[in-house]
Image (cartoon, helix red, strand yellow):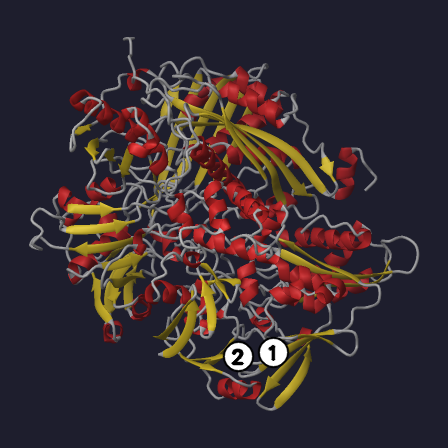
Amino acid sequence: MSEPTGPTLLDPVQMGRPVGRLDGRRKVLGVAPYAVEHEAEGAAQAAMVASTVPRGRVRSIDATAARALPGVLAVLDHTNAPRVADGEDREFAPLQDDTVWFRRQPVALVVAESSEVAREAAALVAVEYDEEPAEVGLRPDSPRLYTPEKLSDGSESDTSAGDVEAALAAATHVVDETYATPYEHNNPMEPHATIATWHGEDAGLGDGPVLTLVDSTQGVHAVRSSLAPVLGIEPERLEVVAPYVGGGFGSKGAPHVNVVLAALAAKALAPRPVRLTVTRQQMFALVGYRTATIQHFRLGADADGRLTAISHDVLEQSAAIKEFVEQTGSPTRSMYAAPNRRTTHRVARLDVAIPFWMRAPGEMPGMFAHEVAMDELAHRCGLDPIELRVRNEPDVDPETGHPFGRRRLLECLRRGAERFGWEEGPRAPLSRREGDWLVGTGVASSTYPANAMPGNEATVTFEHGCYAVGIGAADIGTGSWTSLTQVTADALGVGLEQIRLGIGDTRYPSASVAGGSSGLSSWGIAITAAARAFREQHGDRPSEGASATAGMPDNPDLQEYALNSYGAHFAKVRVHADTGQIRVPRMLGVFSVGRAVNPTTLRSQFLGGMVMGLSAALFEESVRDPRFGHVVTQDLASYHVAANADVADLDAIWLDDDVETHLNPMGSRGAGEIGIVGSPAAIVNAVFDATGVRVRDLPVTADKLLAGLLPQRERDHVLGDASA
Amino acid sequence: MTPFTYTRAHDPASAVAAVAGRPDAVFLAGGSNLVDHLKLGVATPGEVVDVTGLALTGIEDGSDGGLRIGAGVRNSDPAADARVRERYPVLARALLAGASPQIRHQASTAGNLLQRTRCVYFQDTTTPCNKREPGSGCSAIGGYERYAAILGASPACVATHPSDLAVALRVLDASVVVLGPDGERRLPFGELHRLPGDDPSRDTTLAHGELVTAVELPAPPPGARSTYVKVRDRASYAFALVSVAALLVPSDAGDPRDAAQVRLAFGGVAHVPWRATRAEEALTGVRLTDEAIDAAVELELEAATTSEGTAYKRAMLRGTVRAALRELSTGERTLR
Amino acid sequence: MTRINVKVDGVDHTDEVEPRMLLVHYLREQVGRTGTVVGCDTSNCGACTVHLDGRSVKSCNVLAVQADGHEVTTIEGIADGDRLHAMQQAFHDCHALQCGYCTPGMIMQSIDLLNDNPNPSEDEIRHGLEGNLCRCTGYHNIVKAVQQAAGAGVGGGGGR
């Protein structure tokens, strides 16, 4: 191995301080503009017409009634919509032909003077279809299964080492179970929305933008690079603006069809701006979701609980219109040591809406299965579940053989056990009761890769005694406005008050998306490089207007080390013995994510991730009706996310002296996703501890427990308590 | 949303006349359910008659020790009313178990009772639904049935009634005051809602244009205790998987589990708030052991039909009735 | 069209509106109060919460004509000049927001909660905010903020 040098770390002065959100005041005043809050003089309103068949062709569209409505400006469909320049990515080629790929696909777009008229007119557009047989259900025997070339993280579909079958046959303890996770929808609070203004080539703007998109996105440059070729615009003449974004959780990590529709409508109505807001119901079809998974997990262990085999076979789903392959088995490849290992992915290409990123795609469902399987193995081995993990801690990355940058999983588990009051030893389910409630505790590990995305650049300019720093980064609620200001201040060696940060706009240099827990790392690398270049070129006393721009220096460490974050989740649950209702009175997460750039925003990211994990454990499930092909639980009344009273004692801490030396100059890794990884398993494991009922398909709901809950009399017997 | 005309009624009789005279007219009180239906295209009235200006907003003591709650009283108010909380805990708890503070501030008493099912197919105008579009079929059967009915359903409809308040009123033997074109009538609460049969489009026995003006509660039986237990996926803010309104009059002497009278109504199981008369009979004069309660609920459920999606409701209902009656006999509330 | 008179954040407005216009759209598009946002269209998420005659409602679930003759207070009407309302200050101080989209509705409902119950328990806060969904924060800091505001006397009338 060569001697990797790694990034030169910044001296943390502003970093590490709990600086209050710089965007907080605007947000509590209600004056931070999200996408459609931006001024757009005379904007028209657009509303989508969705297909009512899952597969087929549009035979006819009759928009006579819609067009006759006063206030309707245009009805676009495949016969009259502006053409895209590049329709290869079919998600970005709406209204280009008569093909229906999934139910709820937009087949027409109404543009009108007001949203009321647009929506009324959309309901008046009469569409007839030639319906074709559709395949919409994820089943183990689906005729649409195939082996994908790559997973969405770029890794191989299948991996194998040693002889798993022989190892399982020889194992003392075996877990051989199937786990399932449901369809889930990101549901950020701000619906996807766009204001598109088509200025045109000859708008007298010189090299100015041909098209401006004020969009709700996790990456303005991702929107630009994806859609400029689609729309036939030079990338630098597609302007994208998104200063404040009401959450995304992956669903805004790339543009979806709605953004293209807004652009096409704006082109048709140029130069009039067009607003297109995706309704909450439409979000269940158009802006991505987490695929369901069916995971066959097998673990083999010797008499001491040392893993001899790890086998993870994943079935999941993609879409006929566009491929997306969740990397469900990826984390399994590096989590625990075992000489014999295999992972496989088989994907059903269905006639349904397009799945996409949802917070910790792959890691969340994959680690759910893995960490519940580990809990089952601990029971079979008669071991404390933490001790089982201790015995299977790898020395190097089992997948690549690379050394870990710093793997502190066991410290997270031990620190958490101490803080949580974890009772050591083999677990005895059904051993605690408080009144009518059965009480249990559970633990699970967490991991998330430390990512830095390529393609970032930043610029630093000295203006009016301050340093204007620009990068097309996004703050989707994570705190980038604040944490990047801290990073910049330390990179330049000045105070926060001297920094003027600009993000969320393609006028700034190129930035990667706020996704994969990579934002702060990726952007911070470029900002630090730009700051260092600035000091090199202009010194400590720059003249007005001095400026420097820099990209990301090479980092050979990325090829030499396995860089991951780790965490340990602890949960206490109560299950009502009569009704099966589940409550989670306590959750604790302990994390190793490198340096805390801003402890306040970091902790909030952990807590939010953990509660989304709770939500996945107990509530979230999108029900796709196989007879229709669309999700029928398509609002926030029937698709449950955790509400306030579902949360009680919630705590997240992180390890001291945690500095990542291989990834970026801040010494940080990422924190957006690790909270949701493993937390569902901790809750499911706690439910088993409370009830003796092992639920292997999420979400765990009262009805699933009821069948397994022992009748009162037998429970009294087990508990040795006949008093109740 | 389809356009409609909007008028404000200034007295009950003209409100009734306005709606009765036009088949596509509807009453608007708080609007918390109707406005959603307007947005979803589930309701497409030609005229909306606002009745919030009518003086139907009082909570008054009845001559018999009962209460009269005006149809326009917002759900928050009886939930906070000291008389309701003291005399009819089941009612206050049911109200607080429903929706959210914002909706309770807006929703009226009558509107709560007349709210329509939350069956996902009823609310999705692109799927068949006999309730929304008679004759189109029932998508819930064989589809997403988690919230579907198990009692009194028909091959045409398995929708459940979503109101918590209605379940409480059913167990309180309330009555409903209705004004129609031909004058006022009173009907026992159990006669307000109807089973779907072969016409699920009608939720109630009210004729078009009939306006609920008040709900009347008789005095509770002396010594009665009552509660409402709602089982749902979230700890709050969700419709019932099942719910139970229970009223218990302890016997004069002996074990607290001996009851002189038990009344039970179930939510989340039928097109109507379901009064469990067979279970009540089975529990009258019987010690309320878990075994006796389970047997009584099973007796009530002899008429039940469950599917894969609703099979859980049997055990859940047994458990919920156990929890409710245990609370009333011990005075210890373990579920909210 | 129907003529309505509505007082919004202390200012009287007289407008002609279509009966089908939602209060939230009236506030945003005719009055220009875009701080009140739409999150779900179906009265579930609470992001559009405003006060109607001093009580919280979901403005996506009320017709503008229903507000005729009444008073509406939005998130943009509670600060006193540059001085934040104590609830806004508490949300800011406690980092009770991330993306901020639920924040206007959450703050308005929190004020309503303290108006009803000036000294709520944690459990009462959590149930009192049941109709306001937040996808970012895990609610933890929101509860802290309401506790801080209660301590500052918001529900007792001394909070401003």
Q: Nearer the viewer, residue C28 or B26?
A: C28
- Would you name the residue on which mark 1 appears? B56
Q: Which of A657 and B110 is in front in this view?
A: A657
Looking at the rendered structure, the kind of residue marked 2 is Val
What residue is at 45 percent from the left and 34 percent from the top?
A600
Quadrant position of residue A583: top right
Q: Where is residue B211 in the image (x, y as percent from the top left)?
A: 57, 81
Quadrant of the image containing the C terminus of chain A: top right
Marks 2, 1 in one chain: yes
- Would you name the residue on which mark 2 appears? B51
Contact check, label 2 and label 1, Cβ < 8 Å: yes
Q: Is residue B304 in sight in this rendering?
A: no
Give left or right: position of C127 versus A556.
right
Looking at the rendered structure, the kind of residue marked 1 is Leu
Q: Nearer the viewer, residue B207 or C35?
A: C35
Q: Residues within 10 Å of mark 2 (few under 14, many from 20)?
A: many
Quadrant position of residue A690: top right
Q: Which of A129 and A514 is in front in this view?
A: A514
Q: Is residue A60 in sight in this rendering?
A: yes
Check disc 1 and report its element: helix, strand or loop. loop
Disc number for residue C17: none
Check disc 2 and report its element: helix, strand or loop. loop
Q: Position of residue A676 (x, y in %)?
A: 47, 35
Quadrant of the image containing the N terminus of chain A: top left
Name which of mark 2 and mark 1 comes first in the sequence: 2
| C-alpha span from label 2 to label 1 | 9 Å
